[in-house]
Amino acid sequence: MTIQRTLLSLLPGESAFIEKLDVGISTCKLLNLGVLPKTKVTMVRKAPFGGAYYIKLDGHQLAVRTEEAATIILENQI
């Protein structure tokens, strides 16, 4: 049994590669913003009180909501 890691599990400064996006209401928005499989994502910081997650993708920074971050599945690192 493997446990899927999501963007929510990254600590500030930690990086991982995106494996896939779970289908949800914001999937199209994330794809348009460049959140694509095989893209390296770095957690910049988490907003206080769980408001948003600030991430860096291909040199661009963006903020995603908690609900959106939960749909971003990361590759398992061995």
Image: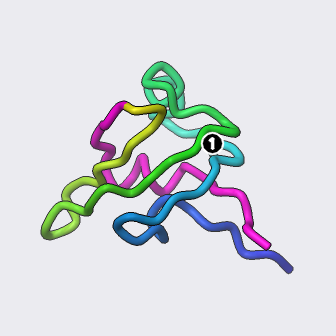
Q: Dot 1, crowdedness within 10 Å: few (<14), some or many (≥20)?
A: many
Residue 24 location in percent, x, y? 54, 39
Image coordinates for residue 32, horizontal then vertical, percent:
48, 19
Q: Residue furthest left?
A: 48
Q: Position of residue 75 (x, y in %)?
A: 71, 58
Locate the N terminus and report the quarter of the image it occupies. bottom right
Occupied quadrant, residue 8: bottom left
Q: How many marks?
A: 1
- Position of residue 32 relative to residue 23, above or below, is above
Colour scheme of this structure image?
A: rainbow
Give me the residue at 48% from left, 57% from top: 70
**Is residue 63 one of those drawn in magenta?**
yes
Report x, y in % for residue 19. 71, 48
Which residue is drawn at the image coordinates 48% and 32% (left, top)?
Answer: 58
State the residue in front, 51 or 61: 61
Taking the magenta stretch, the answer to whether it contains residue 16 is no
52 on left or right of 40: left
Is residue 72 shown above or below 31?
Answer: below
Task: Tell me the amino acid under the disc marked 1.
Answer: Leu
Residue drawn at the location 13% of the way across and 67% of the way down:
48
Taking depth in this image into account, of 33 and 24 the one nearest to the observer is 33
Secondary structure of the residue carrying numbered label 1: strand
Instruction: Report the side of 59 relative to 40 (left or right).
Output: left
Badge 1 is on which residue? 21
- Is 18 displayed left or right of 57 in the figure? right
**Quadrant showing the C terminus:** bottom right
Span of residues in magenta:
60-78
User: Residue lying furthest bottom in this view?
Assistant: 1
Q: Residue furthest right?
A: 1
For residue 28, above or below residue 5: above
Location of residue 29 with respect to 78 vertically, above or below:
above
Question: Who's the residue at 36% across and 31% down the image?
Answer: 60
